[in-house]
Amino acid sequence: MPSQTPLIPRRRLGQELRRLRELRGLHLEDAADHLECSPSKISRLETGQGVPKARDVRDLLDLYGVGDQRLRDQLLRLAGDGRRQAWWQDLADVVSSAMDTFISLESEASNIRYYVQSTFPGMFQTEEYARELFRAIYPRDDDVEREKRVRLRLKRQDILVEREDQPRIGVIVDEATLHRVVGSPKVMADQLAALLQASERQGVTLRVYPFAAGPDIAIQCTFVVFTFESEYDRNSVHIELSAGDRWLEQESDITRYTRIFDDLGRKCLSAEASRDMILSMMEHYSSKEEQPR
C-alpha cells in the first residue's frame, strides 16, 4: 500500500541514499559535484527535506555503483511517492509546517503515545467538539477556515481507521481535560461517549491521570511519541508549547519521553477505572444538558 504522505518515502529514500554514499566512502561534496549542484541539496535529499527527482536519484545510484535492479526500482518508487502531493493539499492554508510533519508521522507510525492535558487527542475528537475547540483557539478564523480545520481533523481520523497496519495507540488524559468544558454539556457528553467507544478499539489503551496522583514534572506540556518498526524511519517526539511546537529526533530523547510516558502510566488509573471515570463525567454532562433552563 503506497504511503499516504510524501514525507515518509522521502525520509526512507534519503536514509538509503546516505547509506549507499557512505558505503562508497564518498562525501556530500562528491555527490554534489556529480549532480553539479550544492552540497546542501544533497543534504536535504538525504534528510527527506528535498523533493526527489527521478533523474537525480538515478545519477546518484550510478555514482554509488548500485547495479541491483530491484533496489534501483525500489528507490525510484520511493522517489515517485516522495513527489506526490499530500492528501491535505487542498487544505494547505490551515496546515502549518509542524502540522504537516505531525500528520505524516501520525499516518505511518507503528506506535503512538499521546499525553494530553488540555484537550482530547485530535484522533478521537467528535466533529462538534473539534468545531467548538477551533472556535475558541482560532477566534479570528472565518467560517470557511474553521470548517477546513474540522475537515482536516476528520480526514485524519478516517486515514487512521482505514490503515491496513493499525498502530498501537496509548493515550494518557489528564483528569482536568474531562472537566474543561468545550462548547456545551451536550458537546462534552457526546465527546466522552466517543472517547469510550475509541477506547474499545483493538490496539488502543486509554488511561486517566487523576488529580489524586499529585504533581509530576512530566505534566508540564502535551507531548506525542511516534515510533516505527522499520529501521529506515526516524522516531520522533512532538512537544506542544505555547511558544511553538518542538520536535526531537535524537534516540536519547525518544527513550527519555517513552520512559516519561511509562512513568506517568504507572500513576494512572487502570484502563477499566479510567473508563468508569469517563462514564461518570459523561453522565454528569448529560444530566446538566437535561436540566430545564
Image: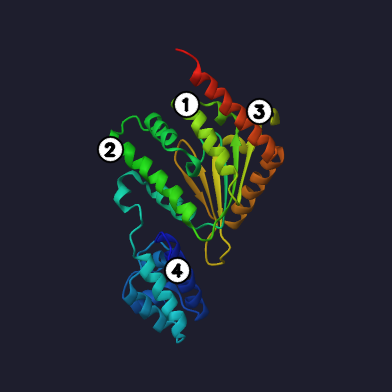
Check disc 1 and give the amino acid type: Lys
Check disc 3 and give the amino acid type: Phe
Q: Position of residue 157 (x, y in %)?
A: 45, 48
Which class describes the residues within 10 Å of circle 4: few (<14), some (14-19), or many (20+)?
A: many
Which class describes the residues within 10 Å of circle 1: few (<14), some (14-19), or many (20+)?
A: many
The residue pinned by badge 3 equals: 211
Which of 217/176 is in front? 176
Tell me the mark number nearer the camera, choosing from 3 and 1: 1
The image shows residue 159, relative to residue 3, as above or below, that is: above
Circle 3 sits in a helix, a strand or a loop, which is it?
helix
Which class describes the residues within 10 Å of circle 2: few (<14), some (14-19), or many (20+)?
A: few
Residue pictured at 47% horizontal, 77% vertical: 21
State which tag comes first along the sequence, 4 or 3.
Answer: 4
State which tag comes first along the sequence, 2 or 1.
Answer: 2
The residue pinned by badge 4 equals: 14
Give the Cα distance between marks 3 and 2.
38 Å
The residue pinned by badge 1 equals: 186
| Res 144 label | 2
Circle 2 sits in a helix, a strand or a loop, which is it?
helix
